[in-house]
Image (spheres, rainbow, N blue to C red):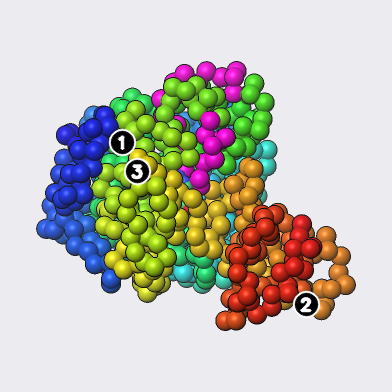
Amino acid sequence: MSNYHIKHLEEYYQVYRKSVRNPEAFWEEIAEEHFVWRKRWDNVLSWDFKKPEIKWFEGAKLNITENCLDRHLPTRGDKTAIIFEPNNPKEEALHITYRQLHERVCRMANVLLDHGVKKGDRVCIYLPMIPELSVALLACARIGAIHSVVFAGFSSHALATRINDSDCKLVITSDGSFRGSKSIDLKVIVDKALEGCPGVANVLVVKRTGTKINMEPARDKWLQPLLDEAYADCVAEIMDAEDPLFILYTSGSTGTPKGMVHTTAGYMVYTAYTFKNVFQYREHDVYWCTADIGWITGHSYIVYGPLANGATTLMFEGVPSYPDFGRFWDVIEKHKVNQFYTAPTAIRALAKEKLEYLEKHDLSSLKVLGSVGEPINEEAWHWYNNNVGKKNSPIVDTWWQTETGGIMITPIPYVTPTTPTYATLPFIGIQPVLMNENAKEIKGNQVDGRLCIKFPWPSIARTIWGNHDRYRDTYFTAYENMYFTGDGALRDAVGYYRITGRVDDVIIVSGHNLGTAPIEDSINEHPAVAESAIVGFPHDVKGNALYGYVILKEVGESRDRENLRKEINQQITEHVGPIAKLDKIQFVTGLPKTRSGKIMRRILRKIASNDTSNLGDTSTLLNPEIVQEIIDNAL
Ligand code: PRX
């Protein structure tokens, strides 16, 4: 276990140096000692960021579920793998042991096989945070099918786009989902989506809310009776190291969502190793990540990373405000949570509430606090540290992305001294660099630039499903021989990194990555709208909120503005999902454009942020006069 658990700062530097001096030897040792392989690799790493092509552990054969489940059975069969905490605190929590989880995964895998799902087929999973969601991911992995989880807050249009992009042949969903005092009829959303998805042959439906739903006789089946009849064991499909494990969509600054493809061996090794170290997980700890499995954080750090370590991972179905704003603290006390991993937006929302919600709970089990998804501001960091951690639990501000598969820049708790708002040091094996606008590396400390990574790590996404050129153009052409993250960062005097935010047109709202293009497209589909542009502006809970500038067609000019705003947001809710609704909508007669017709978002961002003191050079604009008009009418 030599390199598996970092215990002090000197050891971090030592292991870090080793990992970058000879990455192949380093990762080979980790892979060898901590995982089960059906066949050993022939080659640890081959890579070429120009093509780009990256292969880790080529030639190895394995099944990730044997690493997450089977191998634990002799020693941890009766240990809780998943604690399920339902939306309603009055409903009993479930403790699913490794043996039970293994059986549930095997049964679901057999049901998938019975429905003709084969290795390499794509299965779409559109489920709330219930145990079947984790089981569904693992059941796909068991038989070598590629799962594509779509966050169950996305609209039917967004769901259909994703199903069709990767040709999913089967969908796993539920009748509905509980969210606080509300329930959402998921099956209705699926039915609507599938009107435009001819490739889907079957829909398996989990009963959760008990609402009455429509079942298409030839297509839809309740899942539970099938699971009850299915055989409780299922031989794992033997996969190649580089076989795809899953597709997960993320927004781009332009165009359709990108189906990031993660493969098997490297993803497993990296998520397991980071989980162990970033949370300093010990055998009997209870670990809780509040993310939804519909996002990468849930894939890597609710399901695969924890289970590969034989950990106990908590799945929470509900929301932080139900039945009151003390719910997170109640769950921590109830299950004696040791590691708690959440998003700055949740921290900011809870920090606004009365401290009594928190103070009446015993949070003394906590050892490590985590933050992910967006920059954590200083105020939120201190609130988290003082009130939740009582200054006793280090905060790990973890920077990473859907594309990176695992945590990239982070403190190691009890090892790396933390500084508010800093993600601090690169994780073992990660080689970040800062680049300037002339594509030159910025060396030294106390500098800022664009964050790139100059050497592959095991869990980097290998391609965009069906569009390798887009993968290359998005991540590997801005800087030669580098992976470009899309983020800006600074490096301080001691070499700590602070992520300053996106440098492209991706906007992060409440920790959710939103691309401008699909939102603008849906606004533009409104019959009264001619053109639109959206930008982010600072928001004290969401981090960023959306500001839309909308040009109306003549037909819209006589319409009531408030009604139009409502209709536009309704349109966005239907096309993308409620998370993409605009906080402010300003009607304008034009948008600032360059001579090549590109919208100058930099100016719009400044106006939305109420910071018009220095708009920079506007002389290259085609229509500079529009700027003052927009400022005069800003909201
Ligand atoms: O801008 C960075 C921000 O979230 C982006 C990635 O979003 P997504 O692919 O949805 O993955 C989120 C969960 C891993 C990044 O490009 N981001 C993520 N973590 C941090 C962050 N920004 C600042 N600090 C972080 N800790």
| Residue 447 circle label | none
Residue indicated by mark 3: 495
In the image, is residue 370 part of the stretch drawn in magenta? yes
Q: Is mark 2 within 8 Å of ligand 1?
A: no
In this rendering, the count of numbered labels is: 3
Mark 3 is surrounded, within 10 Å at the Cα level, by few (under 14), some (14 to 19) or many (20 or more) other residues, namely some
Q: Quadrant of residue 45?
A: bottom left
Mark 2 is surrounded, within 10 Å at the Cα level, by few (under 14), some (14 to 19) or many (20 or more) other residues, namely few
Residue occupying image coordinates x 73% and y 73%: 626
Residue indicated by mark 1: 276
Residue occupying image coordinates x 62% and y 37%: 349
How far apart marks 1 and 2 lie (CA) works out to 56 Å
Residue 401 relative to residue 159: left or right: left
Circle 3 or circle 1, nearest the eye: 3
Circle 3 or circle 2, nearest the eye: 3
Circle 1 or circle 2, nearest the eye: 2
Label 3: state its secondary structure: loop
In the image, is residue 567 part of the stretch drawn in magenta? no
Residue indicated by mark 2: 553
Q: Give the magenta range.
A: 358-382
| Residue 472 vertical placement versus 245 (above, below) | below
Amino acid carrying label 1: it is Lys
Amino acid carrying label 2: it is Lys
